Amino acid sequence: MKTLSIAALTAALFLGGLTDASAQDRGGVMTYGRYTDSLFLDPVLNDANVDIWILTNIYETLLNPTDDGLGLEPGLATEWALNEAGDTVTLKLRDGVRFSDGTAMTAEDVIWSLDRARNPDNGIWNFVLASVDSVSAPDPQTIELKLKYPDPTIFSALSVFNTAIMPKAAFEAMVGATDAEKAQEFAKKPIGTGPFMLDSWERGATMKLVKNPNYWDNGADGQPLPYLDGLTFEIIPDDATRILKLQAGDIDGAEFIPFARVAELQADPNVKMELFPGTRVWDVIINVRPELDGRPNPLSDEKVRQAMNYAANKEALVQVVTYGVGTPLSSFMSTTTPMHSGDGPLFPHDLDKAKALMAESGYPDGFKTSILTIAGNQDDLGISTALQQMWAAIGIELEIKQVDNASRTDQYRAGTFEMRTGGWTNDIADASQITSYFAYSPTIDALHSGWKNAEVDALFEASQKRWTRPSGRNSSRGSRKSSTRPGRPSRFMKRPIPWRLARM
Amino acid sequence: MQLASFIARRILQLIPTLLFILIVVFALVRLLPGDPASAMLGDRALDADVERINRELGLDRPLPVQFAVFARSVATGDLGDSITLKLPVTELIATRLPITILLTLMAALIAVVFAVPLAFVAATRRGRMADSAVRGAFQVGLSMPVFYLGLILLTVFGARLRWFPVGGYGDGFLEHLHHLFLPALTLALSLSAILMRNLRAAIIEVIDAEYVQFARAKGLRPRLVLLRHVLRNALISTVALFGLSIGTLLSGAVITETVFAIPGAGRLMVDSIYARDYPVVQGLTIALAVLVSLTFLLTDLVQAWLDPRVAR
């Protein structure tokens, strides 16, 4: 009841003159333009997407998500199974896997890596393995996970970056008294099983990855992967400069292409501009607390929120912000999320209905409210100015407040904002993560909106500890149904994940 | 002797200035809304994680204690570790600040190379075509936004003509100079416009002064009159303005470094402020304060050389 959905985009942007891998050309270095540099290359203690996108080239997980993001495929484990009671997971490790320093990956490395990843003192991703009670190796090629309770997300969890396998001995040989200190040293020259390894890193300028000579997998030509000799990442913060460098042929690919430039680049014969489905969702979060700053909050009135949703033309917003690349959402999660449901648009544009709802609400004469946006963010500005006009039609005066991200997060976490623009991408190929943030109140008060529904909370909790299928899951349907029923004025915009460079 | 005591006096004055900056920057970064942990963890942060990380960073301790720890480590030359990059701040400054200094120096040099001769041309041909042309061109340079000017230069001289690289910093000193030319030019144009206007006005004022007329009347060659009497005296105020502009140049470097993809201190500063990376913001501010203070000292020395009355 707390959010406004805007629209969904089922496309992502990838841009470049990449060689077609099926041609099996070998050798060469790909240079890729990034908008900002990575911070810290430790899979367990890191916090940022800019790290994850590099980590997936250096480290590997036991399982991998399939290319469509909806299923799982083998990674460092070739087989995985769940026992009848649903409380023990057994995995068979792949033969002949070596770390980039040449040492063999052992069951001991796997146990140590998973134990480190699930340690509650380590990072903020340990929740992914919260159901794990113990990790052991009955034999050198088998890993067994005992669960505290049946966890339908456990296999997806083993494909999340923080459960990547690291070399225990090499890590522990680092100087430093604590795990964090050792990680600081280890992250300067990470050793993983992934196709690439870090060669050099000039902060803020260039990061060079070279091929891992010990990589286990072979390409279509039967020779060891990867095809490329190396990957060079150049940091080019300015969008226009990044595109200029691509057009000049200085770089082979680039990320974060502004929507305004998509059509132009699709028409450029020297550039291959690809759009592919992502899990990005854009939304406007509404604070529903009855009082804000000591005054009654009109946004706590459900009829007001429904009116706002009907008054907002999502098709128009998709045009304004994404130049038509996106699509309006039919649920609060993207259609690329496993177990997504919903086929019609939420709150189709209907100004008469919106006006009628306003008249019935406690604020028939309208009111003033505000939205927090990131200063300098064109997408935020596009959404907010369009909404300003759309809501003026039902008597709502919207003030656009532009702040920096940390200031907005501060007001967001304190629950003192009125509205804000928001965004989401999935980290786990499962519906549970987004649901736990958007609808389940104990996580972060349903996006810090103050929205709480006991039925939703109970359904979500039940769905997290029950298997309805032995090898997969479909049990969170109940919680999603209740959270997307008509009373919930959700309006979301989904946007592409800019790029994923997990498998070259 | 007089000069030595002048320098000593100025360096002593630096100490309270730096102490003041230390306190101000420590307080200012903490007055910003938000904290490093929630800036780092972002919108999905859980309260427990934010509290745990702020505790690990020692940010749950009373402010006076935090300041004492900070001041003591600064006194020993240790500026702490970056919260987001997990690297010593001194190491970050040592790799990023020289890039910005080189960029600023190149920009200052280009600005002077443009401004001084053109100011002469404009001043000596006052009110004529050449004067209007020079002033008009600089008006455009002054009013053009840096990011826009930078993109035009990149498109024309980088992407089209291929005379210069399209952004980046390159490897090796010569490549650095090559990469930094366009950004330095971008930075220099608005500065040279300011310097040119100031110098032109100063020359006009001096050129009609009685001592210049006297020098000419003595029969000194016009070149010598211009260099020894006109330029030397006209430069005094321009040098002061130039020194003050170095601070502006450093802040202009932030935008230029972004447009031209240069890994300098300006970008590090902006990123660190957004990330509420207190140690980096504090360390860089101190480093920049020292740098600007040294520039002012150097400016004063040059002024003292031009006009010995200044040092008295």
Image (spheres, rainbow, N blue to C red):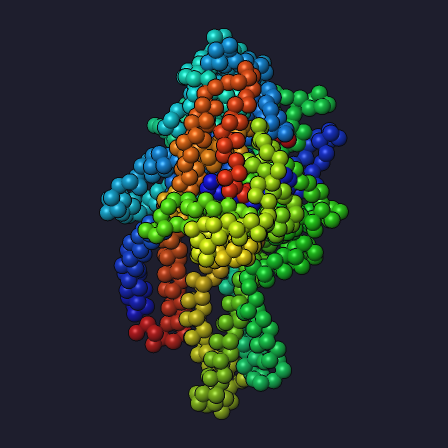
* Picture quadrant of residue A19: top right
Write the residue at 46% across / 55% down: A364
Check the image and report above or below for A479 versus A373.
above
Quarter of the picture containing the C terminus of chain A is top right
Q: Position of residue B305 (x, y in %)?
A: 39, 72
Write the residue at 66% across / 47% down: A324
Q: Position of residue B55 (x, y in %)?
A: 31, 37
Check the image and report above or below for A243 versus B145.
above
Check the image and report above or below for B136 versus A276.
below
* Picture quadrant of residue A465: top left
Q: Position of residue A409 (x, y in %)?
A: 42, 45
Check the image and report above or below for A322 versus B119.
above
**Is residue B62 among what the camera can see?**
yes
Q: Position of residue A90 (x, y in %)?
A: 51, 12
Q: Nearer the viewer, residue A143 or B259?
A: A143
B9 left or right, relative to A275: left
Write the residue at 59% across / 61% down: B148
* Picture quadrant of residue A132: top left
**Is residue B267 among what the camera can see?**
no
Count of picture labels: 0
